[in-house]
Amino acid sequence: MITPKYKRNINRIFPFGLIWLVFSLIYTILERGLLGDLNFYPSSGLKYIFGRNIIIIPVLATLFGTIIGILEILYFNKWFIQISFTKKIIYKSFVYLLIISFLLIIIFLTATSEATNAISSKEFWIVMFSYFTDYSFLGILTYIASIILMTQFYTEVSESMGTGLLSNFFLGKYNKPVEEERIFMFLDMKSSTRIAEKLGHVVYFQMLQQYFSDLSGPVIDYSGEIYQYAGDEMIISWRLEKGLRNNTCIRCFFAMKESLMDKSFSYKEKYGLVPQFKAGLHCGKVTTGEIGVLKKEIIFTGDVLNTTARIEGLCNQYDVDILVSDSLAQKLDLSPYYEVESVGKNTLRGKDGQFELFTVN
């Protein structure tokens, strides 16, 4: 069973292999057109076989692209997280280019040594020098550099927008409005104004960065989608069936609580406090679609969002960390695993009728 975290990583790594595959096929076809009827490379004299290249080059390129994707998603993206967008692309692209150049040299040395039968021979070094100083090698290096830059740009845009959001734009999933049933969690930091005054706005913002980062892990683990950040508020969404399965939306809430508890020492050491949050959960129909001209977004519209925000706002009134609407509580299977307590019925501002709300422990 693939966990949501591994599935997300696979979805993030896959485009790297795909981009390299597409560009390697373009390169192989262009190379065929440029060499025409020649059966050798003019720069090195090595034998040229189109039938072999059309298979080997795309396979190797896909492998290289996947390796770069693994390095990027699992390692480099974390190591370079503190530097600016442009520097991040330049530095990482330079590292990747060095790796690819090294691999190209190894491949060339292997191929040339077979052709000349001896690395120590004078002929071998003449061939190698002529190849690496020829415009054909520089052309290949420039082509590879452009692919690396493109994959880096894709990564940064994807991370900024969110992988799911970017894929939805590409696929045109919400080009026309779609009606969906979704669960929403509005999550708000407790006493944020007091904390901001105590820490100062710059340090408070640094704490917010760490706070949202620590909360994001459980959101990934429990298949949530971060819809928006608004100040110290995070809005998380699930498709109805996904959020209901195994009480995923509720488990996500408690996993986020646990994540902050695990990092409590770090927060106390850096900021002298541990941030806490409260959340309201509700479900219902929304219309989902692309909107905007100068800046496009995929947004949800519907009464369920306003209602969820108002439910979250009642947490302070009832002195609880979580409130769940009756319509969502009825769909979840909470009783065997959680202690569910009604806080009573409430008339929400701007709503007809009353909602029964529940807190969960």
Image (tube, rainbow, N blue to C red):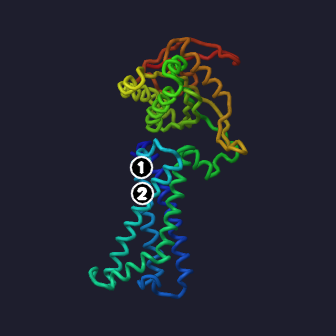
Q: Residue at x 51, y 51 (%)?
A: 155
Q: Residue at x 42, y 75 (%)?
A: 132
The residue indicated by pointer 2 is 95
Q: Is residue 326 left or right of residue 223?
A: right
Disc 2 versus disc 1: nearer the observer: 2
Disc 2, SS: helix
Quadrant in the picture for the N terminus: top left
Q: Is residue 210 above or below residue 39?
A: above
Amino acid at pointer 1: Phe
**Residue 226, x across and y down, in percent:** 54, 36
**Residue 316, x across and y down, in percent:** 54, 14
The residue indicated by pointer 1 is 76
Query: Residue lying furthest right in this view?
Result: 293
Amino acid at pointer 2: Val
Q: Residues within 10 Å of mark 1 (few under 14, many from 20)?
A: some
Q: Nearer the viewer, residue 232 or 140?
A: 140
Quote the CA–CA distance across marks 2 and 1: 10 Å
Q: Nearer the viewer, residue 203 or 18?
A: 203
Q: Is residue 61 above or below residue 231?
A: below
Q: Earlier in the sequence, mark 2 or mark 1?
A: 1
Q: Residue at x 36, y 72 (%)?
A: 107
Q: Residue at x 52, y 14 (%)?
A: 342
* Residue 307 in view of the camera: yes
CB contact under 8 Å: marks 2 and 1: yes
**Residue 63, x across and y down, in percent:** 41, 63
Disc 1, SS: helix
